[in-house]
Amino acid sequence: MTKEYDLNDIIEMKKQHPCGNRLFRITRMGADIKIKCTQCDRIIMMPRRDFEKRMKTVRQKYEA
């Protein structure tokens, strides 16, 4: 089962960020995924494999 996500989607992670938030916006996609916390605006970059393990659900799809 593959999870569907795209650039600018709001996703929920399994573990919360130190600021207490679980929601992040995808800002870059490639071999690495860059996500930005929606509460404190910190940026996290991780390999796609780790991202797919840590992602829980896509909360809001980006509509262009």
Image: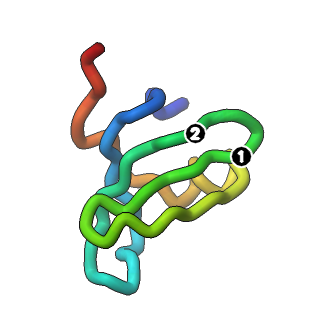
Q: Considering the numbered disc 1 on the image, is that residue within a helix, a strand or a loop?
A: strand
Q: Which mark is residue 53?
A: none
Q: Amino acid at mark 1?
A: Asp
Q: Position of residue 8 (x, y in %)?
A: 39, 34
Q: Residue at x 30, y 66 (%)?
A: 22
> Badge 2, how many Cα within 10 Å: few under 14, some, many 20+?
some
In the displayed structure, does residue 24 sit left or right of residue 55? left
Q: Nearer the viewer, residue 26 or 4?
A: 26
Q: Considering only vertical position in the picture, is 1 above or below 10?
A: above
Q: Position of residue 54 (x, y in %)?
A: 52, 60
Query: Which of labels 2 and 1 is toward the front?
Result: 2
Residue 18, quarter of the rendered image: bottom left
Q: Residue at x 67, y 58 (%)?
A: 46
Q: Considering only vertical position in the picture, is 11 above or below 31?
A: below
**Residue that mark 1 sits on:** 32
Q: Considering only vertical position in the picture, is 37 above or below 5?
A: below
Q: Residue at x 29, y 26 (%)?
A: 62
Q: Position of residue 43 (x, y in %)?
A: 51, 63
Q: Looking at the rendering, in which quadrant would you find the C terminus?
A: top left
Outermost residue to the top: 64
Tally of marks: 2
**Residue that mark 2 sits on:** 28
- Tags 2 and 1 touching, CB below 8 Å: yes
Outermost residue to the bottom: 18
